Image: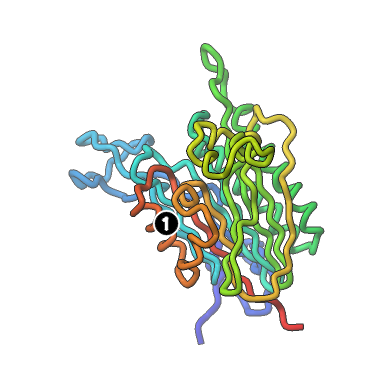
Amino acid sequence: MDTLKCPECFAPVAAEDRFCEACGRNLLVRRTPLGGPTGPAQASCILCGSPDIDDEDYCTQCGRHQPSARDRVEYALGAVSGVSDRGKRRARNEDSMAFGHVAGKGVAAVVCDGVASSERAEQASQAAADAAVDVLLNALIDTADAEQAMIDAVAASCFAVEQLVENEPMEAGGRGVAPSCTFVSALVTDTSVTIGWVGDSRAYWLSDEGSKQLTTDDTWAAQLVAEGVLTEEQARTDRRAHVLSRWIGADAGRVEPQVVTLKPTSPGVFLLCSDGLHNYRPQPEDLQPLLPCGPEEFVKVALDAGGHDNITVVLVPFAPAEP
């Protein structure tokens, strides 16, 4: 029989243990690594093989810049899985994802897309995702109200991103454009899901019995569609299509997410993604054929279509509890 070990310190634990006696780790909670991947993707230079890589991911021997560990990120925790890819045109991956589950309680997942025109966009998205998923996991542990937990999670994300500015020394000429990002999240139990979002990252419900988009983009173009000024087709090609009307950032003011709670009666998958995917497959029926696939296939579709932006996809399977 295999010996169970703490995922934090690898000390032996028993199946009935809730906490590791050696390090105090909560054994009922598993989540993606805090801070996401850091440093180069490989321990040695891809050109000359030297192990001497500096803090900015350049080889000190030949000067070659090394691929970042953030260029391609893949996580899986049980049935929940996610992939984040730099894409083909961007210099870096400014998307982030974080997710986790509480044994017997449910799953929390977050996708954030760093705003490319802002400073330290990848730090903003990672800080926001990490802060939010911790709040949502604690809500699962405490069986707290899901919609209030989503509001609290966004507040925590806003605070985490604001701290990037507070902790940054003032440079000559000012700090530049405040770090900012979009946000979409799912809090999933065996009876319901609560979705919260700010910006244009999206959530979809994919099921053999019918699929639908669960979020509405916080963009000027989407607002003009809602007001009847533009058609959806006109909005997709409008120059304002990706101009955000709401976002998370130190310059965003007071932010509360749009929140919706659903209680599906059939099995399916909740899909969270950045616009690197839905720019190419915007409609639920465009995504429906990929329902049996993992996140790798969703990302591949966007890469094959051009991969102009960072692409992040998190899939959370759902099966309703037995009556």
Location of residue 50 in the rendering, given as x and y in whole percent from the top left corner: 22, 44
Pick the residue in front: 183 or 15.
183
The quarter of the picture where residue 243 lies is: top right
- Relative to 265, residue 295 above or below: above
Residue drawn at (53%, 37%) of the image: 241
Q: Looking at the picture, how far across and down is residue 322, in whole percent?
A: 72, 83
User: Measuring 63% from the left and 79% from the top, which residue is drawn there?
Assistant: 15
Whether residue 208 is visible, yes or no, is yes
Amino acid found under the numbered disc labelled 1: Val
Q: Is residue 38 above or below residue 221?
A: below
Q: Residue at 75%, 47% (x, y): give it.
A: 152
Q: Residue at x 67, y 71 (%)?
A: 103
The residue identified by callout 1 is 299
What kind of element bears circle 1?
helix
Position of the C terminus, as image quadrant, is bottom right
| Residue 186 sits above or below residue 291 on the image | above
Q: Position of residue 108 (x, y in %)?
A: 65, 60
Residue 161 image position (x, y, % from top left): 62, 36
Q: Quadrant of residue 220?
A: top right
Residue 317 seen in the figure: no
Apparent side of residue 285 relative to residue 297 in the rendered image (left or right) = right
Q: Is residue 132 left or right of residue 280?
A: right
